[in-house]
Amino acid sequence: MTLTEQKVHGRRAHLALVTGKEEVPTKSRSEKFDVNVISCWGPAGSPGKSTIAANLACEMTLLGQRVLLIDLDTLAPSLAVTLGLVDTPAGLSACLRLADQNRLSIEEYRRLTVAIQVGRHELRFMSGLSSPSRWPEVTLERVSKMLTTLKGEFDQVVLDLPQATNFQSNLNHPSTSSLVGELNRDSLLVEVLERSSKVVLVTGSDPVSAHRFLAAKEYFDSNVQNTNPYLVVNRFRTGALGSRAKAELQETYLSLAQARIDTFIPDEPGNFDRALLNGLPLALLKRSSPARQAISDLARQLLLDSASGEALAKLS
C-alpha cells in the first residue's frame, strides 16, 4: 500500500505526502564501518541537523568519549560557523587525500583538525569542503580508509551529512534541476547512512517540516538497508499543531512512516541563538536548558545502545 492510499484524518491530513512510493530493487547488504559512526541526517529545509550533530558530539565528549566531529555535508558545510571557527585547517579534503596516498599520520591528523576544549575533555573537529563543487573528492573508499587509519584516535565519530539531491518521489531538492546527469551524487550519502553504527534523523515540529520528513523517510527506506534510525523532533513547540502536537506527530509518523519518535527537543530560540553567537554548545552555555538535557539524554542513549563491558561501566 502506498502512502497516498493510506487514509488520514483531521490535522494529520496536513502532514500527508502527495506522492506515491516507487518500487526499487533490493540491494545487497553493506558492511558497517569498523569504527563507531553516528550520522546525523534530515530533509531539506534546515531542520537543525548540524546543530544536533555539534551538540551530540559535545555531550559525548563530556561523557568521557574521544570524539571526532566531521562536517561531511558536501552541499552546504556549516559546522565551522556553528562552532564559531573563523580560520580552520584544510580538514576533510586534505585528510582524505593523504589517506588515499597512505600518508595520513597521527601528526597530520592533529594538524588538519581543530581541538575544541569541552569541559575537561577535548573534541576534535574536521572541517568540511571549501567548495561544494569539490564533492567528487569525497568517496566512500577514501572516507573508509581515513577512518580505519585513525581508529585508535577516537571512540566515536559524529558525521553531519548533506540532504539528498534526488528523491524517488516527486518531492525533489531544488538543486536537482542543476544536477542533471549527476544523480550519483547521493551514492556516498546512502552508503554512509547504511554503514553507520547509528543514524539520527532530524525533523521539525510543524506541518511543513513533517511533510518534508515523510518524503525523506520514504527515500531513506527505499535506499538504506539494515538500519533502524533514531528519530528526533527538533525545535518542538505546539503553536503550529496545537496542544496535542506530540500525539499528532507520533500518530502521523507511526501510521505513515512506521517511525517512532525517540526524542523531542524543546524550541529555545534564545538559547540556541546565544550559543551560535558565542560558538558554544548548549552544555557550556546553559547546562540547565531543557533542550540541552534532551540532547544529553539522546547522546547517552546512543552510547548505551552500542556500548558493552568497560564502556558501559564508564557511562553508568
Image (tube, rainbow, N blue to C red):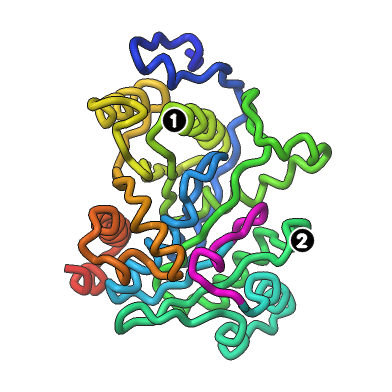
| Callout 2 secondary element | helix
- If you read the primary sequence from the N terminus, does the residue marked by circle 2 or circle 1 appear first? 2
Where residue 116 is drawn, which disc sits there?
Answer: none
Location of residue 313 by image quarter: bottom left
Q: Secondary structure at mark 1?
A: helix
Name the disc covering residue 134, or none. Answer: 2
The residue shown at (48%, 55%) is 39
Stretch of the chain drawn in magenta: 72-86
Front-most of residues 249 and 31: 249
Left or right: 159, with 255 as reference point: right
Is residue 135 or residue 152 the one in the foreground? 135
Numbered circle sitting on residue 210 = 1
The picture quadrant where one finds residue 71 is bottom right
Q: Amino acid at mark 2?
A: Arg
Residue at the image point whose x is 28% and y is 58% from the top = 292
Residue 179: image x %, image y %? Answer: 79, 41
Residue type (three-letter) at the residue carrying disc 1: Ala
In the displayed orientation, state which residue is furthest to the bottom.
Answer: 107
Q: Is residue 155 visible?
A: yes
Name which quarter of the figure residue 61 lies in: bottom left
Was residue 288 drawn as part of the magenta stretch in this picture?
A: no
Residue drawn 46% across the image and 49% down it = 48
> How many neighbours does mark 1 have within 10 angstroms: few (below 14), some (14-19), or many (20 or more)?
many
In the rendered structure, does residue 76 fall within the stretch colored magenta?
yes
